Amino acid sequence: MTQIPLEDRVALEDLLTSYCLAVDTLSDMDALLGVFTPDAVCDLSGIGLPSLHGHEGIRGFFDSVFADMTHHAHFVSNFRVDRYEGDTASIRAYVMGMGRSRDGNDVLVYVRYFLDCVRTPDGWKVTRFFEDALMPLPGSLDEIHGKR
């Protein structure tokens, strides 16, 4: 792997953090979509949820998530750059995500994120996002989001 400049490593980690912070607002769709390229794939099939295509697919899913939830919190650890080639990179991290739905269900998941990223004139963006489980998933995840 090519040595990654510190500025790019920090920018890639900030990109991941921006995704988590946007999801946790439960309202800032512009910030959430701003993390992704317009043609990005956000594949949640590793946790039993749909694969989302492009900004419209991502918006449609997260509009429902934002409407269904009262609280979200995501905590990131074990950040790693797996591949760096100047204008493209692949990163991963462990994430603990928790939330409460409007109907009172709580969810707590331990997952891994895998992101393929590209440098754009507006900074680093996600072209492909994949999530899978580190620990068995709780039934509440399906109760809250499985209806999609």
Image: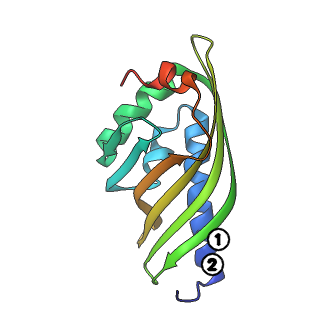
Residue under the image location 64 percent in, 53 percent down: 94
Marker disc for residue 37: none
Vertical relation: 119 (above or below) 98: below
Query: Where does the image place residue 108, in percent across and percent down from the top left?
Result: 65, 32
Q: What is the crowding at mark 2: few (fewer than 14 residues within 10 Å), some, or many (at least 20)?
A: few
Query: Hey, which quadrant is residue 22 in on the image?
Result: top right
Q: Quadrant of the C terminus?
A: top left
Query: Could you tell me if the residues under marks 1 and 2 are in contact, i.e. CB atoms within 8 Å?
Result: yes
Does 21 sit left or right of 58 as displayed? Answer: right
- Give the residue at mark 1: 10
**Label 1 SS:** helix
At x 48% / y 45%, what residue is drawn? 32
Q: Amino acid at mark 2?
A: Glu
Structural crowding at the residue carrying mark 1, measured as other residues with C-alpha within 10 Å and reported as few (<14), some (14–19) or many (≥20): few
Q: Report, in whole angstroms, how far the alpha carbon at label 1 lies from the one at label 2.
A: 5 Å
**Relative to the observer, which residue lies in front, 38 or 100?**
100
Give the tally of numbered discs: 2
Find the residue positioned furthest to the bottom.
2
Q: For residue 7, which numbered disc appears in the image?
A: 2
- Asked where in the image residue 116 lies, by quadrant, the reply is bottom left
Counting from the top left corner in percent of width and height, residue 126 is at 43, 60
The structure residue drawn at horizontal position 42% and vertical position 35%, both measured from the top left corner, is 48
**Residue at position x 37%, y 41% in the image:** 58
Mark yes or no: residue 122 visible: no
Q: Name the spot of residue 7 as percent of width and height, x first.
A: 63, 78
Frontmost residue, 20 versus 27 = 20
Q: Secondary structure at mark 2?
A: helix
Query: Mark 1 belongs to which amino acid?
Result: Val
**Left or right: where does residue 3 sit relative to residue 118?**
right
Specify the color scheme. rainbow
Does residue 125 appear in the picture of this structure?
Answer: yes
